[in-house]
Image (cartoon, helix red, strand yellow):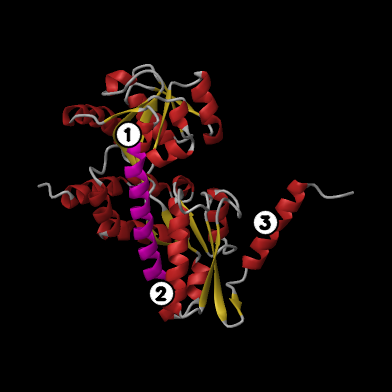
Amino acid sequence: MQPSSTTLSALAVAALLSSAAAPALAQGKFVLKLAHSDSADMATSRKAVMADAFAKEVKAKSGGRIEVQVFGAGALGGERDLIEGVKNGFIQGGLASGVMANFYPNAMVTDMPYLFPSNEVADKVMDGPFGQKLSASFHAATGMHNLCFGEVGFRHFSTGKTPVHSPKDLAGLKIRVQETPLYVTEMKSLGAQPTPIAFPETYTALQTGVVDGEENPLPTMIFAKFYEVQKHVTLDGHNYGVDWFVLSDKFYKSLPADLQKVVTESAKLACRAERQANRTFTANGTKILADKGVAVYTPTPAEMAQFRAAAQPPVIEFLKTKVDPKLVDDIQAAVKEAAGKK
């Protein structure tokens, strides 16, 4: 009897994980398997850009002593699988975002609605003392290293029929969200009816009217072709997502000090490359959506104040029951300082 294709696929992944189990010193060089679940196409995938930049920089700076092998497109599993692999030392490195709160609840603190007023402020906060403190806390809690923060970017609303200019326009609308309590709390605060739906099923749900809209960064909307079934986009930036660059402690400790430095510095460069690529994708996205017949709306400062006033207090109250309350205060203070506010 011939094994099924599913069985063969499972065996292939198992073989890859098995070969990754040792901190990989092959023929005098270290091997770092880096996994992510995004597309492997650098023309559309920020994580593909990030992984490629890291691999090239490590090769150059280590003189070839570290070989980075990139496994994209979910080759080693979804985000939860690959972070489990890093935690257990089966995979050396992983790039992930939303799933991180399952391993480290404090990761949710960056999901506070309307927290960052701009990319520049987000960079200052996540690269500065607050981000360093969060990474150190992550290491203490999980045993894994976070080498740097990349970005998922700002999340915006799209709707099929009803343009959204302020929270009152969301009243009663069914908005598809990730199956995350924070997002559910946030949408309820804004007056919408949050409807958790798996991402692969979202297009059909929008097309058939099961939900009235959804929320995602612009590159995700375009990749998923939501513009075919959504004719309004509101650039309110209600959440800013971060990507974590996670490294196995077992692998990190196996490296000599000079190569630890190479990996750390190369990751920071890779995170900067990812941010730049994602911002280019986003900037191009506004024009792409407009060309597809989507009405793209930017809320006025007064309308943004309404969104913020509706969403922040209840979500902050929720967050303080799930994460270290001091972190909530600390990140708000860091944003205020980075934005130059007194």
The reply to whether discs 2 and 1 touch (Cβ–Cβ < 8 Å) is no
Q: CA gap, disc 3 to disc 1?
A: 39 Å
Tell me which segment is drawn in magenta: 263-287
| Amino acid at dot 3 | Val
Q: CA gap, disc 2 to disc 1?
A: 39 Å
Q: Quadrant of residue 123?
A: bottom left
Residue 277 within the segment the image draws in magenta: yes
Q: Earlier in the sequence, mark 3 or mark 1?
A: 3
Q: Nearer the viewer, mark 2 or mark 1?
A: 2
The reply to whether discs 3 and 2 touch (Cβ–Cβ < 8 Å) is no
Which residue occupies 18% across, 52% down?
A: 338
Image location of residue 12, percent across then percent down: 70, 57
Image location of residue 30, percent across then percent down: 55, 76
Q: Which mark is residue 13?
A: 3
For the residue labelled by badge 3, is the local secondary structure a helix, a strand or a loop?
helix
For the residue labelled by badge 2, is the local secondary structure a helix, a strand or a loop?
helix
Q: Which mark is residue 315?
A: 1
Residue 285 as seen in the image, left or right of residue 210: left
Q: Nearer the viewer, residue 324 or 60?
A: 60
Q: Nearer the viewer, residue 7 or 232?
A: 232
Question: Mark 2 — residue?
Answer: 262
Q: Earlier in the sequence, mark 2 or mark 1?
A: 2
